[in-house]
Image (cartoon, rainbow, N blue to C red):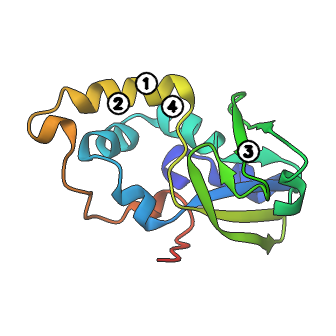
């Protein structure tokens, strides 16, 4: 959050609903994807904004929705009968109350559709394992709150 100067947005504004990826979610990104995130502040900001919704939404609210717009301007899809999937991510911890909103811990880093296509294209051009590289072994939780439920 601090790397993209988004920390102040959450401190001053709200209420928000934030989808926080686990450390394991960051571990599933390739080294190339993580490098791109770290080096491109605008890209990182857009991805962070894709994890934030204006307003407070409990998981029970998701049961009534099929999609919702994020701060990035892109929408995330909500699926399953009980609203426990956001795009391809499973919600692992729900309804964590904070001073200015709600956190839902998810098992996947959400990527807006345009960014997801470009990430997958770049990753597939990497050498070795057809783009499937070893998981990042650093500290991926530093981009978001360190809420690792694994």
Residue that label 2 marks: 120
The kind of secondary structure element at disc 3 is strand
Which circle, 3 or 1, is nearer the viewer?
A: 3
Judging by the rendered image, the residue that carries numbered circle 4 is 42
Q: CA distance from mark 2 to mark 1?
A: 5 Å
Q: Position of residue 73 (x, y in %)?
A: 72, 27
Give the distance between the C-alpha atoms of the residues marked 3 and 1, in whole angstroms.
Answer: 20 Å
Closer to the eye: label 2 or 4 = 2
Q: Which mark is residue 117?
A: 1
Residue 75, can we see it? yes
Label 4 to label 1: alpha-carbon separation: 17 Å
- Residue 21 placement: quadrant: bottom right
Q: Nearer the viewer, mark 3 or mark 2?
A: 3
For image coordinates 35% across by 38% down, the residue present is: 39
- Circle 4 packing at 10 Å, graded few (<14), some (14-19), many (20+), is few
Q: Earlier in the sequence, mark 4 or mark 3?
A: 4
Tell me, yes or no, whether the two marked residues, 2 and 4, touch with CB atoms within 8 Å. Answer: no
Q: Residue 110: where, in percent of width, then height?
A: 55, 44
Q: Is residue 140 left or right of residue 53?
A: left
Residue 14 seen anywhere in this rendered image of the structure: no
* Distance between the alpha carbons at the discs numbered 3 and 2: 22 Å
Which of the two marks, 4 or 3, is nearer to us in this view?
3
Report if the CB atoms under discs 3 and 1 are less than 8 Å apart: no
How crowded pointer 2 is (Cα within 10 Å; few <14, some 14-19, many 20+) is rated as: few
Tag 2 and tag 1, C-beta contact below 8 Å = yes
For mark 1, does the 10 Å Cα neighbourhood hold few (<14), some (14 to 19), or many (20 or more) residues?
A: few
Which residue bears the numbered disc 3? 78
Measuring from the top left, give residue 6's x and y in whole percent.
63, 48
Q: Earlier in the sequence, mark 3 or mark 2?
A: 3
């Amino acid at each position: 959050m601090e790397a993209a100067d988004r920390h102040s947005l959450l401190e001053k504004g709200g209420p928000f609903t934030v989808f926080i990826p686990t450390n394991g979610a960051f571990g599933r990104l390739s080294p190339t994807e993580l490098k791109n995130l770290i080096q491109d502040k605008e890209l990182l900001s857009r991805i962070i904004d894709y994890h934030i919704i204006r307003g407070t939404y409990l998981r029970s609210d998701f049961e009534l929705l099929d999609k919702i717009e994020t701060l990035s301007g892109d929408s995330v899809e909500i699926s399953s009968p009980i609203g426990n999937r956001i795009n391809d991510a499973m919600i692992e911890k729900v309804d964590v109350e904070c001073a200015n909103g709600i956190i839902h811990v998810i098992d996947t880093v959400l990527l807006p559709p345009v960014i997801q296509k470009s990430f997958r294209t770049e990753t597939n051009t990497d050498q070795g394992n057809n783009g499937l590289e070893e998981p990042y072994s650093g500290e991926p939780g530093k981009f978001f709150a360190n809420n690792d439920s694994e």
